[in-house]
Image (cartoon, grey):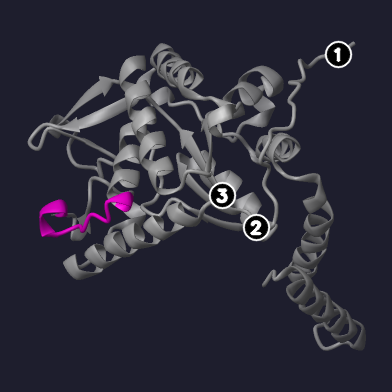
Amino acid sequence: MNFRTNIQLTKEHNQIDYNSRLLLIGSCFSENIYQKLDYYKFQTSSNPLGILFNPIAIENLLTNAINETEFTKKNIFNLNERWHCFDAHSDISAISEEEILQNLNTAITSTNKQLKNASHLIITLGTARIYRHIESDTIVGNCHKVPQKKFLQELLSVEEIIDSLEKIITLVKAENPLINIIFTVSPVRHLKDGFVENTVSKAHLISAINTIVEPRNNTYYFPSYEIMMDDLRDYRFYNKDMVHPNELAINYIWEQFKTVWINEKSTSVMNEVETIQKGLAHKPFNESSKQHQLFLKKLQQKISQIKEKRNISF
């Protein structure tokens, strides 16, 4: 008897290999996929302004990057002895004005270059619910624990999300016509908004993405949310908070992503990289033993060979 409804996925065109240049932007789940790609030493970067959850925040980042918009003092504010920016995650925040502006503008410059050279842009949308800062009448990427009375919470309509995603595609492809854009919806549930509210939010995101993706235009959808909700479908695949996927679930979704998006010719290289990674993580009982020194010598030889042959550095 089968107790699972295993999702059946097929390979996409324009797959990822070790020559691909990847940029991942979006919710915390995009970080999970980034960490896997980074572990296997693909050419990848993630969330230059930190984690962003809603499509408008992601659109703002990409617009600012493409237009090389410079952040100034008018874009930052001080709270709890740190400087913040509503367009960025708290990871970018700093203790001085100079430091945060440097962080923001460095991220914009690097993102501009990455977008021009990227082969794949992976965008993970987390929620259709946004916070509008009342005083400035702008949609923020992060509230930075500013009192909630300073914001209005809104639900983006499907039409508003479609408009935002179409702007993203147009902007990015104007800079890089051959780029492949992969959309996915985070399997992390935003239950602080409410169970029904979370379902409506995810439905708006999925409906909008379904409207705009077109493989002939190199825009795609990867069903992270559906894999979690319909394939795994069990609380044993969640962390203790019962909201975030646990390591087992992340690994499973990653394996599905590999099946769809990683070129089979890269598998042997990934196996080589994994062998080295496990070697680097190995903790010997006796670091000075001859056996361990021989192990390190062989490991260094493998690192040198893969660097020379594949241009992969550790």
Q: Is residue 82 left or right of residue 291?
A: left
Please tell me which residue is depicted at 39% across the width and 51% down the height of the picture: 50
- Mark 1 near mark 2, Cβ–Cβ under 8 Å? no
- The reply to whether residue 142 is visible in this rendering is yes
Residue 157, visible in the rendered structure? no
The local crowd at label 3, few if under 14, some if 14 to 19, many if 20 or more residues have their Cα within 10 Å, is: many
Is the residue marked by circle 2 packed among few (<14), some (14-19), or many (20+) residues within 10 Å?
many
Quadrant of the image occupied by residue 280 = bottom right
Q: Residue at x 33, y 49 (%)?
A: 89
* Residue, disc 2: 42
Residue linked to disc 1: 2
Image location of residue 6, percent across then percent down: 77, 20
From the viewer's perspective, is the residue at label 2 or at label 3 nearer? 3
What is the span of residues highlighted in magenta in the rendered image? 65-77
- Residue 99 placement (x, y as % from top left): 25, 69
Q: SS at mark 3?
A: loop
